Image (cartoon, coloured by chain):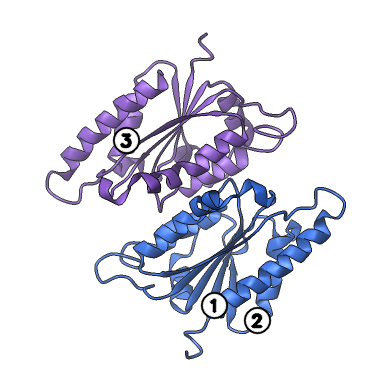
Chain colours: A blue, B purple
């Protein structure tokens, strides 16, 4: 791979990253790596007005795209959904001779407050499906998902546990990126 | 049922309703009915800044809540997701003694451009799951989903077909509301 092709783009969506445990740790660790760019949508587009051209160029420059977010109601934060709806346009991401992201790789990476027992495999399969469907439609490789539960500080010791889990999450994500 | 309890609230999300076939027809037919209120999120909140209090009051006044939208990338338009994330708060929709929507009913109603063959049952199950999960979490009854394919005007005769399908969709939706 050449320098350009090994680039990883992190699309980070978290409306309150300063209060975050998981997404703050994960994005901090990712930023320390070479060839990783993070675009924090909430900082770039607090008014939900996406610069489509800039985002499409960022996608074209990357080989691997990571969607990093906290799970909200079994789905992404709204700003990430707006980003997808605006950026993955006909004529760019799909349509006759217009699969400009073909062959790139997608990873989905999300955190949850709830315990693992609330998220059996059949529910996780449903949660990640929209990204799998998007990847397939746009001829992108769906590389897999990394997710963590119990990311909260609701009781004594919970935050320390969440920090440990988030560190592990980061390492698993990095391993998948380098796959 | 008394007058208040039989009220139906339609949460409509469509960024370009004037160009719409399905959602325009369905919402027009719904508006002709008694005891149905439509809140068109794109008209109310073009800047994505939801009036949480007003939306929660509208929910409390209704017995049946219909989410009406075009399917975008196997999910809702972003504004509908923002509405859910903002309005279904801890202390209002869930949390100790705070299930204020308990016993109400949810219907999911969406249109798709793609043909039915692209949407087998296992995919539709995944598409509606976030609403089923939301309903369960908030002790709301998930009444079911109404969906239609082939809503577009890409070739000769397609629009007439889409209009027929949309009319049928409206009748099925009204029957489910009155269930």
Q: Residues within 10 Å of mark 1 (few under 14, many from 20)?
A: many
Q: Earlier in the sequence, mark 1 or mark 2?
A: 1
Residue at the spot x=77%, y=63% of the render? A163
Q: Which residue is mark 3?
A: B24
Residue A86 in view here: no
Disc 2 vs disc 3: which is toward the camera?
Answer: 2
Q: Position of residue B37 (x, y in %)?
A: 45, 24
Farthest-out residue, left: B156
Q: How many marks?
A: 3
In the image, residue B104 above or below residue B15: above
The 10 Å Cα crowd at callout 2, few under 14, some 14 to 19, many 20 or more, is few
Question: Considering only vertical position in the picture, is B39 above or below A155?
Answer: above
What residue is pinned by disc 1? A8
Which residue sits at x=45%, y=47%?
A: B126
Q: Chain of mark 1?
A: A
Give the chain of mark 2. A
Residue A171 image point, x, y percent? 67, 74
Task: Answer with left or right where residue A118 lies relative to residue A4.
Answer: right
Q: Residue at x 32, y 26 (%)?
A: B172
State yes or no: discs 1 and 3 in contact (Cβ < 8 Å).
Answer: no
Q: Are marks 1 and 2 in contact (CB under 8 Å)?
A: yes
Marks 1/3: CA distance? 41 Å
* Residue B83 image position (x, y, % from top left): 55, 41
Q: Is residue B143 above or below residue B118?
A: above
Q: Which residue has dot 2 on it?
A: A33
Per the image, label 3 sits on a secondary structure element best described as helix
Alpha carbon distance from label 2 to label 3: 49 Å
Is A50 or B146 nearer to us in this picture? B146
Left or right, B47 with reference to A88: right
* 1 vs 3, front mark: 1
- The residue carrying pointer 3 sits among few (fewer than 14), some (14 to 19) or many (20 or more) residues within 10 Å by Cα, namely some
């Amino acid at each position: 791979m050449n320098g350009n092709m090994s680039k990883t783009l992190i699309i980070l969506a978290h409306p309150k990253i300063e209060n975050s445990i998981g997404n703050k740790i994960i994005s901090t660790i990712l930023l320390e790596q070479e060839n990783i760019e993070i675009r924090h949508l909430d900082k770039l587009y607090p008014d939900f007005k996406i610069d489509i051209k800039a985002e499409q160029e960022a996608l074209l420059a990357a080989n691997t795209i990571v969607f990093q977010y906290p799970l909200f109601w079994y789905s992404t934060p709204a700003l990430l959904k707006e980003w997808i709806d605006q950026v993955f346009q006909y004529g760019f991401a799909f349509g006759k001779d217009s699969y400009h992201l073909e062959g790139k790789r997608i990873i989905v990476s999300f955190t949850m407050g709830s315990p693992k027992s609330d998220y059996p495999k059949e529910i996780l399969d449903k949660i990640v499906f929209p990204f799998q469907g998007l990847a397939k439609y746009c001829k992108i490789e769906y590389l897999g998902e990394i997710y963590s539960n119990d990311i909260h500080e609701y009781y004594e010791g919970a935050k320390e546990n969440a920090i440990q889990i988030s560190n592990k999450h980061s390492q698993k994500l990095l391993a998948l990126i380098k796959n």
